[in-house]
Amino acid sequence: MTGRVTIVGLGPGDPRWLTPAASEALTSATDLIGYGPYVDRIGERPGQRRHGSDNRVELDRARFALDLAEKGARVAVVSGGDPGVFAMAAAVFEAIENGDPAWRELDIRVEPGITAMLAAAARVGAPLGGDFCAMSLSDNLKPWDIVEKRLRAAVEADFAVALYNPISSARPWQLGAALKIVSEIRSQDTPIILARAVGRPDESIRILPLADVEASMADMSTMVIIGASTTRLIERPGNEAPYVYTPRFYGVRP
Ligand SMILES: C[S@@+](CC[C@H](N)C(=O)[O-])C[C@H]1O[C@@H](n2cnc3c(N)ncnc32)[C@H](O)[C@@H]1O
């Protein structure tokens, strides 16, 4: 079988964050597949077919990509951020595992991208400089009980926690419930980073103590980073935002 599927990470927004390898994969594809706004971020090329689709059809999109590749196409499936983080790479492998056995013969590649949590962290300093974990707050594909259990365990274990998919119009209450759990465990002055649309023209970054954070401050383009107990602010002169960082050591400074 000669076809190929490459799942390509576009990064969170700024085109300068697209890796040269991802760029090559996009250039050499015969077909681009992805959520419409992501496909729109890529310049048109003569002869290259573009298949933009709705956001909620990841598995259909994955099967379509595999079908095209089975017929010999070089398909690039595009994803925001990194394609392996709550995104299309896992959807493609889910489709392969449960689909046409012939798809297992295809050449499947994953081209990494900068994931939103790293772009958000870089904007404020180094809040993920110690141990951290990442979670999606979406309960579309897993029960809310599991989300709560994992979040509570992560906060109790004193990880900094990066929350993807914090809120949406279809999931309006989950972030409020998550903040309540965090408040039961962490002190009210824990630094929280609300990084919205990082790398896009409408980017906004807020650093607030836990006590001042409300779920309504986030939307579906927001990355929420919850500091660990060791995460601290370095104040700066005038109106400059503080730096936020989590030291690499825990307890006694070496
Ligand atoms: C379905 S997940 C996809 C994550 C993506 N694969 C990545 O690696 O960043 C979508 C969530 O990622 C976060 N996100 C994606 N792009 C972002 C950006 N430019 N700024 C802030 N958060 C972003 C938001 O939390 C959003 O709800």
Image (cartoon, rainbow, N blue to C red):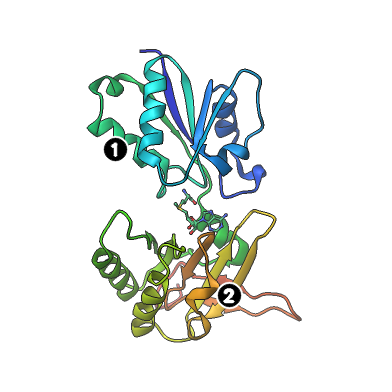
Determine the residue positioned at 24% across, 33% down: 97
Q: Which residue is mark 1?
A: 94
Labelled disc at residue 144: none
| Mark 1 burial class by Cα count in 10 Å: few <14, some 14-19, many 20+ | some
- The three-letter amino acid code for the residue at tag 1 is Glu
- Residue at disc 1, secondary structure: helix
Report which quarter residue 185 is drawn in. bottom left
In the rendered image, is residue 22 in sight?
yes
- The three-letter amino acid code for the residue at tag 2 is Ile
The residue nearer to you, when weighing 206 against 43, is 43
- x, y (%) of residue 204? 64, 65
- x, y (%) of residue 125? 59, 65
| Quarter containing the C terminus | bottom left
Q: Is mark 1 within 8 Å of ligand 1?
A: no
Determine the residue positioned at 62% across, 62% down: 123
| Quarter containing the N terminus | top left
- Residue at disc 2, secondary structure: strand
- x, y (%) of residue 132? 40, 63
In the rendered image, is residue 247 in sight?
no
Determine the residue positioned at 66% across, 32% down: 43
Apparent side of residue 54 relative to residue 24 in the rendered image (left or right): left
Q: Closer to us: mark 1 or mark 2?
A: 1
- x, y (%) of residue 172? 43, 69
Q: Earlier in the sequence, mark 1 or mark 2?
A: 1
The residue nearer to you, when weighing 125 against 222, is 222
Q: Which residue is mark 2?
A: 207
Q: Is mark 2 within 8 Å of ligand 1?
A: no
| Mark 2 burial class by Cα count in 10 Å: few <14, some 14-19, many 20+ | many
Vertical relation: 101 (above or below) 37 = above
Vertical relation: 104 (above or below) 192 = above
Report which quarter residue 50 is drawn in. top right
